[in-house]
């Protein structure tokens, strides 16, 4: 593993390469890499290294892993566009394609629909997943819908090749509590509050602990999940939706999926307009905080568990 004197510069170079590769054809990848190797003869820019605790994969691994996952995402997108209320891509594939995507990286999707079973029909037409995987997913959703637990989020991971596609299904009403008027009223008024969200998953989350940064860089320690119920092999528990403490917003698990950058894959304009409004209001909130600040730098890039990594990926927008 390569150890650089200035890993920040190295990461910025790798991200610059990733941007060029994202704009090029497959046949141009090697020539782009060679161009940068000549430009930075004193640096090993292709090897794996660590930055702020995160592994930046070897460059060919990042390219191959990105290409493989983008193919899967494109097939799913084509199967769902013009049919589902909305479909978003988040995670490393949205903010770090050809740079931070590894061979072990999941694909992170958020599907907005009031009819979870319609997802099954669309995934079948994508012809990406083995029939057994689709059948298991369908049986899982049916169990959740019949459980009487009424979760707001249905999470699941489907295996394709050597990685997983995670799909978080949420209703239109739940989307509004995460990104709509209810959340925006809380955050713009700096209403101190703790909000949880009921989640269905295939695993118990009693040991879920993670450190969530706020927009000022302060840390709120989430976990463990609460009110865990197991029913017919499905676990229902309360996860953090978001928290506002002393006027500072700490985002929750599912807000993190789409922050600070996401890709719109499919859906109707109404939901996409809400997301645009969400980003606009977040900017207003950040501006309001910074207006009265003397030394603290408030930023949306602070409010993510991977904030130190994301600050270097300078092409990010909110």
Image (spheres, helix red, strand yellow):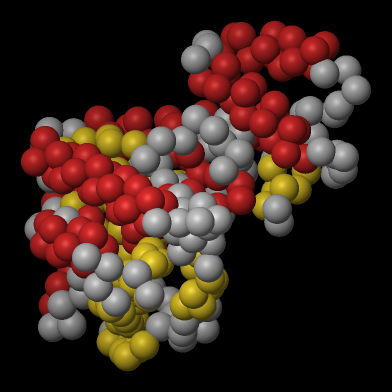
Residue drawn at point x = 75 percent, y = 33 percent = 10
Q: Is residue 291 visible?
A: yes
Horizontal arrangement in the rendering, residue 209 relative to residue 291 (left or right) = right
Tell me: residue 235, above or below residue 169.
below
Q: Position of residue 251 (x, y in %)?
A: 38, 64
Quadrant position of residue 32: top right
Residue drawn at point x = 62 percent, y = 29 percent = 15
Q: Is residue 116 visible?
A: no
Q: Position of residue 49 (x, y in %)?
A: 78, 43
Image quarter hosting the N terminus: top right
User: Farthest residue in the right direction?
Assistant: 42
- Residue nearer the viewer, 177 or 286: 286
Q: Position of residue 273 (x, y in %)?
A: 15, 39
Horizontal arrangement in the rendering, residue 292 relative to residue 1 (left or right) = left
Tell me: residue 271, above or below residue 256.
above
Residue drawn at point x = 40 percent, y = 83 percent = 225
Q: Position of residue 296 (x, y in %)?
A: 53, 57
Image quarter hosting the C terminus: top left
Horizontal arrangement in the rendering, residue 309 relative to residue 267 (left or right) = right
- Residue nearer the viewer, 190 or 200: 190
Quadrant position of residue 14: top right
Tell me: residue 85, above or below residue 70.
below
Q: How many marks?
A: 0
- Residue nearer the viewer, 223 or 171: 223
Residue drawn at point x = 33 percent, y = 32 percent = 75
């Amino acid at each position: 593993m390569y150890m650089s004197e200035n890993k920040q510069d190295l990461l910025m170079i790798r991200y610059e390469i990733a941007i060029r590769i994202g704009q090029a054809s497959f046949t141009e990848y090697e020539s782009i890499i060679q161009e940068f190797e000549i430009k930075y003869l004193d640096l090993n820019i292709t090897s794996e290294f660590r930055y702020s605790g995160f592994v930046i994969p070897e460059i060919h691994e990042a390219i191959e892993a990105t290409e493989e996952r983008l193919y899967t995402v494109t097939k799913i997108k084509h199967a769902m566009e013009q049919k589902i209320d909305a479909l978003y891509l988040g995670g490393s594939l949205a903010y770090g394609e050809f740079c931070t995507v590894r061979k072990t990286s999941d694909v992170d999707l958020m599907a907005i629909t009031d009819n979870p079973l319609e997802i099954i029909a669309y995934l079948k037409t994508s012809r990406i997943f083995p029939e057994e995987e689709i059948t298991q997913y369908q049986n899982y959703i049916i169990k959740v819908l019949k459980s009487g637990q009424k979760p707001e989020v249905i999470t699941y991971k489907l295996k394709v090749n050597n990685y997983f596609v995670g799909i978080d299904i949420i209703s239109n009403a739940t989307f509004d509590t995460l990104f709509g008027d209810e959340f925006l009223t809380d955050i713009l008024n700096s209403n101190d509050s703790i909000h949880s969200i009921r989640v269905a998953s295939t695993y118990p989350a009693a040991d879920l602990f993670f450190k969530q940064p706020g927009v000022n860089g302060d840390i709120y320690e989430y976990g463990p999940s609460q009110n865990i119920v197991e029913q017919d092999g499905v676990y229902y528990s309360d996860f953090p939706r978001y928290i506002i403490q002393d006027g500072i917003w700490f985002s929750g698990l599912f807000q993190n999926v789409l922050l600070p950058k996401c890709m719109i894959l499919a859906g109707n304009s109404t939901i996409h307009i809400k997301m645009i409004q969400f980003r606009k209001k977040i900017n207003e909130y950040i501006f309001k905080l910074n207006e009265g600040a003397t030394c603290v730098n408030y930023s949306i890039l602070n409010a993510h568990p991977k904030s130190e990594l994301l600050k270097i990926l300078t092409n990010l927008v909110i």
